[in-house]
Amino acid sequence: MNASPTRVLVLAGGISHERDVSLRSGRRVADGLLAQGKDVELRDPDATLLPYLRDTKPDVVWPALHGASGEDGALRGLLDLIGIPYVGSRADAARLAWDKPTAKSLVARAGVRTPLSIALSRESFRELGAHSILDELADELAGDLVVKPAQGGSAQGVSIVSDRHDLPGAMVNAYNYCEVALVEQRITGVEIAIGVLDSGAGPVALPAVEIVPVAGAYTFEARYNAGQTDFYTPARVSTEDAERAANAALAAHSALGLRHLSRVDLIVDGAGTPWFLEANVLPGLTETSIFPLALVAAGHDLGRVYAALADAAIQSM
């Protein structure tokens, strides 16, 4: 008698700014799991989710929730509490990676370069004098700046500042998405993303994907609208630079305690040095996303990888 198929609950949607992206990722994951013979349910989380989980007890949850609802560790902590396995990083590691200033500090301690930066809360920005702070930032962080929310993804709220007069608007833009803004020096070079995959045999770096937005900036629209970004896999960097970047991605994955899958965003400068920008505990898995592109470039079948991650999550409980 054949065993019943693994019951996988894929969570997608949520209420974050990245809801639409999450729905697209979830559908792709569900399709891949179905192709591997899994018993799959795709569900949008709401107030009935926890009672539903207690009643139905799926074998494993596959969170495809982008933004705070899926990446800040809260949902993962609840799943730990009720004893249901799930794909992806543990709650504590997710919290570390979700907060960009914290992630930068931990990864820097592991020996990976990261741009000089400062994190400023909205309250501090007001109380300490916005004009004085802006003047200091422009003076001390030389060159172009990148201003972004300290938490969040998909380039929402991110601004590149070349003229110091544009800095106030960039701060306001970041504060629209988070109470803390991260201001960092812009590193110029080749923008790459490296996926890290671990379905049980240890983390492996996938081929680096080079990101070349048609309009010059890798915005939210450039990420998720076909034709607005050119991707090169493998990235057009030397073998030595690619190896250094892969080692940096693995170091970041390890320093943050990540599990199963992650995507590490880096800039490789003219000297071949990789600079850590951020790590994502749930990379986008849409038809235009980088992580699936890297999986295919490495010769993987997407459905098999998603199924293997579900199996690994069950075995690691």
Image (spheres, rainbow, N blue to C red):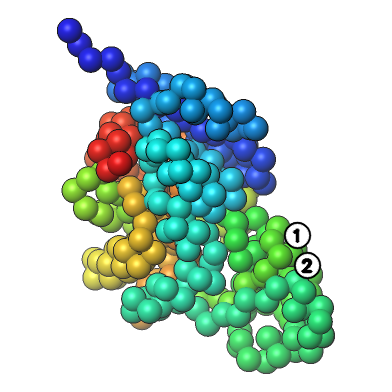
Disc 1 marks a residue whose amino acid type is: Asn
**In the rendering, which numbered label is found on residue 172?**
2
Residue 165: give x, y in percent of width and height: 79, 79
**Residue 103 makes an appearance in the image:** yes
Residue 309 drawn at (x, y percent)? 31, 38
Q: In screen coordinates, is 271 left or right of 166?
A: left
- Residue furthest out toward the top: 1
Camera sees residue 229: no
Query: Where residue 141 appears, x then y in whole percent?
Result: 61, 86
Tell me which corner region of the image, top left, top right, bottom left or bottom right, holds residue 156: bottom right
Residue 176: numbered disc: 1
Between the C-alphas of marks 1 and 2, the distance is 6 Å
Give the residue type at disc 2: Val
At mark 2, the secondary structure is helix
When the figure is inspected, residue 11 is found, relative to residue 185, above or below; the finding is: above
- Disc ID at residue 70: none
